[in-house]
Structure formats: C-alpha cells, structure tokens
Amino acid sequence: MALSYCNDHLTDGFIPREQVSRLITATPSRALRLANALVTAGLWEDRGADGFQVHDYLDWNDSADEVRKKRGAITEARSYAGRMGGLRSAEVRRSKRASKPEANHEANASGVLEAKRSPLHSTNPPIVPPSPFATSTTTNRDDPNATPRGWIPPPGTIYPDGCAKPGFAHIFPPERRGQCPKHQVGQQTASGEAGG
C-alpha cells in the first residue's frame, strides 16, 4: 500500500507520518508499530516527525520528474495522434464527397458546399458523346440551336441513360430537353397524367 501511495502521489518514496494509518485498516498506534517493524527490517527509513522513506525507492522506481516527463510525452503523443486522426478523417470525408458528383450538385444547389464553376462555364469543357436520343443537329454547325460540340450536362441533371431529369430541362439545348419513352412513361405515371 505504501508503494502504491508513493507511485500515485509521486512522493519519490516518502510517506508522511499522518498517512501511515490511512494506508491500512488499523488504528494509528498499530499502523506506527507496523511502520517501525518495516524500519527494523531495513525496508523503510525513519525520517523523524515528518514520516518514513521507502529504502532504495529510486533505485527501483522512476523519480517524480521522470514520471511527469513520461506522462507529458504520452499526452503529447495522444494529442498528436488525435490531430492526425482528425485530419485523416476530414480527408476521407472530402474524398467521399468528391466521388459523389450527384450529391455534390444537390449540396451546391442547397448552398451547403462552396459554389464551383459548372462545366457549362468552363473555357475548355470535355467532349462527351451525344445523348442516345439526340437529333442529328447535335453536331450541325449551321443550326444556332444545336448542342455545342463538347457540351456536357452538369452533374445530377441527367439519368444514367442520358435523359434530362425533371426540373433541369431549361438548362439543356433544345434537342436535349426531351426524355426517352421510358422516363416519359414513368413521369406520366408518377404525376397521374394521361397521354404522352
């Protein structure tokens, strides 16, 4: 119990006299008799009115200063690991957001993410094949309403098969505003309209 007390309170092996009776369940007089027995056995040293010193404590245990340094190093290492883990977590979240263009477009529309330039406003947009239902005007340079070569729709505005999603048709060139029969049927059924 004395060694645990010294380690917990970083006393370098010193036990104040008033603490001796608190280390074990005994009366103060019995605790002092046991302490004196430890002194007689050479395990403790009597320091007079102040208390007792565990013999050769620092030969077998770290000093209070060494323990504080080690604890400080552990605290700093944990703090550093926490910061690095937080940075890595943020990096993973950013890469997940970047890998979901449709989610990014919806977040941009709601103002969650920073506004970014659309491919429509890019000075050098990538070239993509025309929609499967686009007319021959897609590459006709004489038609002012034709889809410009290389035009691509913004992320999240088309279905995987190239059809314009409802609510985004106005940003498409005229020949790209229509929907294929599959999506027209689905839209009519969902809205309850007949015909088509």
Image (cartoon, rainbow, N blue to C red):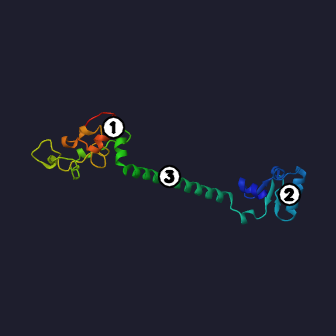
Residue 33 placement (x, y as % from top left): 90, 56
Residue under numbered circle 1: 189
Q: Using the rendered image of the protein, determine whether residue 117 is visible from the camera's viewpoint.
A: no
Tell me, yes or no, whether the two marked residues, 1 and 2, touch with CB atoms within 8 Å.
no
Residue 92 placement (x, y as % from top left): 43, 53
Disc 1 element: helix
Give left or right: position of 88 versus 25: left
Q: Nearer the viewer, mark 1 or mark 2?
A: 1
The N terminus appears in which quarter of the rendering? bottom right
Q: Is residue 104 above or below residue 84?
A: above
The quadrant in which residue 169 appears is top left
The quadrant in which residue 196 appears is top left
For image coordinates 65% across by 60% down, the residue present is 66
Identify which residue, 17 or 157, lies in the foreground. Answer: 157
Q: Nearer the viewer, mark 2 or mark 3?
A: 3
Task: Identify which amino acid the numbered label 3 is placed on.
Answer: Arg
The quadrant in which residue 32 appears is bottom right
Residue 53 placement (x, y as % from top left): 79, 59
Q: Using the rendered image of the protein, determine whether residue 5 is visible from the camera's viewpoint.
A: yes
Give left or right: position of 161 versus 14: left
Give left or right: position of 59 versus 95: right
Task: Indicate which disc, 3 or 1, sits on the residue closer to the N terminus.
Answer: 3
Task: Identify which amino acid the numbered label 2 is placed on.
Answer: Ala
Residue under numbered circle 2: 35
Tell me, yes or no, whether the two marked residues, 3 and 1, touch with CB atoms within 8 Å.
no
Identify which residue, 139 or 161, lies in the foreground. Answer: 161
Give left or right: position of 135 versus 5: left
Task: Identify which amino acid the numbered label 1 is placed on.
Answer: Thr
Residue under numbered circle 3: 83
Residue 159 placement (x, y as % from top left): 31, 46
Instruction: Name the residue at the front extreme.
Output: 195
